[in-house]
Image (cartoon, rainbow, N blue to C red):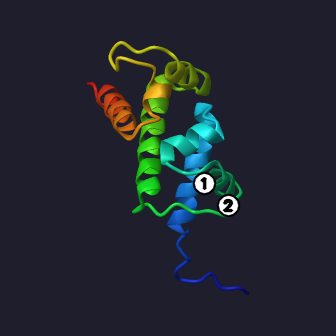
Amino acid sequence: MSRIPARLPEPERDAVLAKAVTRAADQLGLSKATLGRVLGLSQATVTRLYQGQYRLDPGSKPGELALLLLRLFRSLDSIVGSTEAARAWLASDNAGLNGVPRELILETRGLVHVTDYLDAHRARV
């Protein structure tokens, strides 16, 4: 009879963050080039990220930006509920944000602004 260890090893957070952000980018319809611009990574590094050969430390600048992008994804998903609607929202001009979210998130302050905007709308009662 085999025994299950009392404590299973925790998943490596760097690998989990890398996988989560690539999946979110895919769901949002962001190209590798766009993801690289959002995270401040070269296209070669983003390719390694997708291949599982590059991991994102949550404490690094790209890791912090990845966490913001995940927050954006989760908020948008909870508001619109579908991949198609999320992609359409990102590509549409938004008067509240004074721009197109897909373009705004290419800069750090835009990513923060869009994420805060979505968080505020998600939290409405």
User: What residue is shown with label 1?
Assistant: 19
The earlier-in-sequence mark between 1 and 2 is 1
- The answer to which image quadrant residue 53 occupies is bottom right
Between circles 1 and 2, the one closer to the viewer is: 2
Question: On the rendered structure, is 8 left or right of 68?
Answer: right
Q: Nearer the viewer, residue 62 or 8?
A: 62
Residue 56 to residue 77: above or below: below
**Residue ID for mark 2:** 52
**Location of residue 27 in the rendering, given as x and y in whole percent from the top left corner:** 61, 35
Q: Which residue is more in the foreground, 1 or 120?
A: 120
Residue name at image x 62 percent, y 81 percent: 4
Quadrant of the image containing the C terminus: top left
Tell me residue 95's x, y (percent). 36, 12
Query: Hey, which quadrant is residue 86 in on the image?
Result: top right
Determine crowd level at label 2: few under 14, some 14-19, many 20+ residues with C-alpha closer than 10 A: some
Which residue is at the front of the view, 104 or 17?
Answer: 104
Q: Is residue 6 left or right of residue 119?
A: right
Residue drawn 33% across the image and 32% down it: 113
Are the residues at dot 1 and dot 2 in contact (C-beta closer than 8 Å)? Answer: yes
Total labels drawn: 2
Q: Quadrant of the N terminus?
A: bottom right
85 to 9, vertically: above or below = above
Disc 1 crowd rating (10 Å Cα; few below 14, some 14-19, many 20+) is some
Identified at 47% across, 44% down, the residue is: 70
Query: Please, what secondary structure does the residue beneath circle 1 have?
Result: helix
* Residue at screen point 45% across, 56% down: 63
Name the residue type under label 1: Lys
Coordinates of residue 51 in the picture (x, y in percent): 71, 57
Name which residue type carries label 2: Gly
